[in-house]
Amino acid sequence: MAYAAWLAKLTGQSWRLPTEAEWEKASPWTPQVMKVQQYTWGDIFTTPRSNTGERGKAAVGLFRYYPSPYHVYDMATNVREWTHTLYRLYPYTLSDGREVDESDERRVLRGDTYATAKSARAASRGYGTPDYTSSTVGFRLALSAARSE
């Protein structure tokens, strides 16, 4: 969140961590079948389409031929990703206080690491406190759309 705030100040654009709902829609949500799939490409695991433990961490974009239905890359495996959302049980309800900026509570991590084929699911969900660090956790930023008046 600090990096997003720094980048927003530097560029004058509204950079931020995506909410859990945004992350889920960008990755395993498939509008054609109206459901969350296990992987960005479907429900059947296929090794060449993702990064698993055989390779270790991989460069972003290595699996560019297998984007999510919304054309977002590398969401199935590589590292877990931070979201803005405080960790609460499902179902997701926007009005339950999950989307607050200042909090030391656990935040949702989505996606999974490169560890194993079994755990390499875009639909994977976990959490961490803001001070948690790991070589298997990263982030991507969302850019808020400009509002028209």
Image: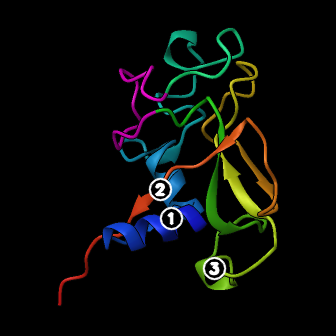
Instruction: Please tell me in which quadrant of the rendered image residue 69 appears.
Output: top left
From which residue to which does the magenta span run? 60-73
Kindly report the distance in space between the C-alpha atoms of the residues bearing marks 3 and 1: 12 Å
Mark 3 is on which residue type?
Asp
* Residue at image mark 2: 141
The answer to whether residue 110 is seen in the rendering is yes
Secondary structure of the residue carrying tag 1 is helix
Q: Are marks 1 and 2 in contact (CB under 8 Å)?
A: yes
Query: What numbered label is drawn on residue 97?
Result: none
- The image shows residue 143, relative to residue 94, as above or below, that is above
In this orientation, which residue lies closer to the viewer: 129 or 127?
129
In this orientation, which residue lies closer to the viewer: 123 or 31?
123
* Residue at image mark 3: 101
Secondary structure of the residue carrying tag 2 is loop
- The image shows residue 13, relative to residue 124, as above or below, that is below
- The image shows residue 44, relative to residue 96, as above or below, that is above
Q: Are marks 3 and 1 in contact (CB under 8 Å)?
A: no
Q: Residue at x 65, y 68 (%)?
A: 85
Query: What numbered label is drawn on residue 4?
Result: 1
Mark 1 is on which residue type?
Ala
Q: How is the image coloured?
A: rainbow
Q: Magenta span: helix, strand or loop, mainly?
A: loop
Quick one: quadrant of the N terminus? bottom right
Q: Position of residue 4 (x, y in %)?
A: 50, 64
Q: Of callouts 1 and 2, which one flags the residue occurring earlier in the amino acid sequence? A: 1
Callout in the foreground (1, 2): 1
Q: Of callouts 3 and 2, which one flags the residue occurring earlier in the amino acid sequence? A: 3
